[in-house]
Image (spheres, rainbow, N blue to C red):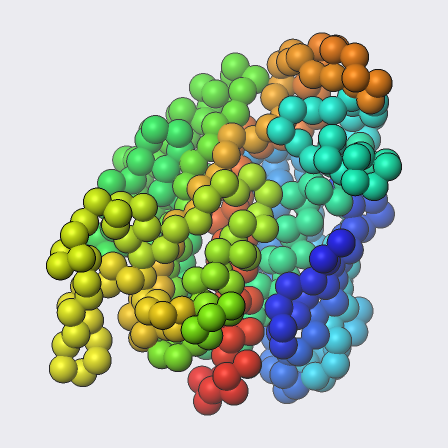
Amino acid sequence: MSNSIGKIFKLTTFGESHGTAIGGIIDGCPAGIVLDFEAIQHELDRRKPGQSTIVTQRKEPDTVEFLSGIFEGKTTGTSIGFVIKNTNQKSKDYSDIKNTFRPSHADFTYTKKYGLRDFRGGGRSSARETANWIVAGAIAKQLLKNIKINAFTNSVGSITLDKSYHELDLSKTESNAVRCPDNETATKMIEHIKAIKKQGDTIGGTISCVAQNVPLGLGEPIFDKLHARLGQAMLTINAVKGFEYGSGFEGTKLKGSEHNDSFNTDGTTKTNLSGGIQGGISNGMDVYFKVAFKPVATLLQKYDTIDADGNAVTVQGKGRHDPCVVPRAVPIVEALTAMVLLDFLLLHKTNTL
């Protein structure tokens, strides 16, 4: 089922939304790294449910327990095993959909592919799986040292933060529930999400991410381009519908003479429409990209669908769900970015670590 990501720094995960626990095994982490366990738990707390009124109210502590690969606070170079217990399942909320397929979910495709599915919260297809990624990403962040990774909510529905990351104080990202580093825009986003939630509906949005101090030379020119690996990682996130880096789709409106990044004498570029990546390889400039998230498919209202026998039925949505996944996805974007960059650093055996 392709439960692994990475080539050297590799994460393999397990678990379902309403099972006993989720967890994973991290291979390829160098030995002798002193881990900050509070920092790892802090990253999990940023993603966990129930943290504000605009996210799902499922109450999970998301406390990680390490089982192996760490001795006296340091990595041993062997596999790091960990688990995160599920403590607040309400599987009965999903009994009504046991034999029906929710629109735009994995219900139908999982059933047709495997012949059965865990209908409790989506089972393996649930975004609860992303907590595992946070653990590996938090460890990766600690190994990246000088590389700074900051993601933030760029839009919710039609409400867009009309500023580049250069114009923002990214330290303000965590100052509000929607994780937008502009308080005026954040207030509008929060009110919009609350209004959508009252309707039993959902809304999507975008997340921007910038990685600074990325060394030159990460990425390969053909099948392992840096932006291709970042795109694959981001498109793995539940509800993601698009990925663009640098000038992205807006760059299609420019002429080549307007889009080219002219060089300075030191090898840096006067502009950075390339997004820090040229020919699939990092060029030493900031790496930045944007990720698009669809509205959550689970609606807390009646909707028409079909059952396992192909009959048309009407179902009433139940359970605890995010009206907008974007705020909780911000640390997930950062975690995956850290994992991809660290994997490339280890592949290239640079002296950055």
Pick whichever, 104 or 49, lies toward us.
104
Query: Which residue corresponds to the image point at 70% horizontal and 74% vertical from the top-left?
Result: 27
Q: Residue 218: image x %, image y %?
A: 43, 76
Residue 209 vs residue 100: left or right? left
Where residue 128 sits, quadrant-wise, is: top right
Pick whichever, 76 or 117, lies toward us.
117
Residue 46, can we see it? no
Q: Residue 84: image x %, image y %?
A: 75, 54
Q: Count up the numbered dots.
A: 0
Where residue 201 sits, quadrant-wise, is: top right
Residue 203 vs residue 315: left or right? left
Pick whichever, 225 or 156, lies toward us.
225
Residue 308, can we see it? yes
Pick whichever, 147 or 61, lies toward us.
147
Quick one: quadrant of the N terminus?
A: bottom right
Q: Residue 303: image x %, image y %?
A: 64, 13
Q: Residue 233: image x %, image y %?
A: 55, 57
Residue 74 vs residue 243: left or right? right
Decide: is 225 above or below 167.
Answer: below
Decide: is 312 above or below 121.
Answer: above
Residue at the bottom extreme?
Answer: 351
Query: Which residue corresponds to the image point at 74% horizontal and 17% vertical from the top-left?
Result: 306
Decide: is 52 above or below 336.
Answer: above
Query: Which residue corresponds to the image point at 69% horizontal and 41% vertical from the top-left?
Result: 126
Residue 133 vs residue 64: left or right? left
Decide: is 281 above or below 159.
Answer: below
Query: Which residue corresponds to the image point at 40% horizontal and 58% vertical from the top-left?
Result: 150
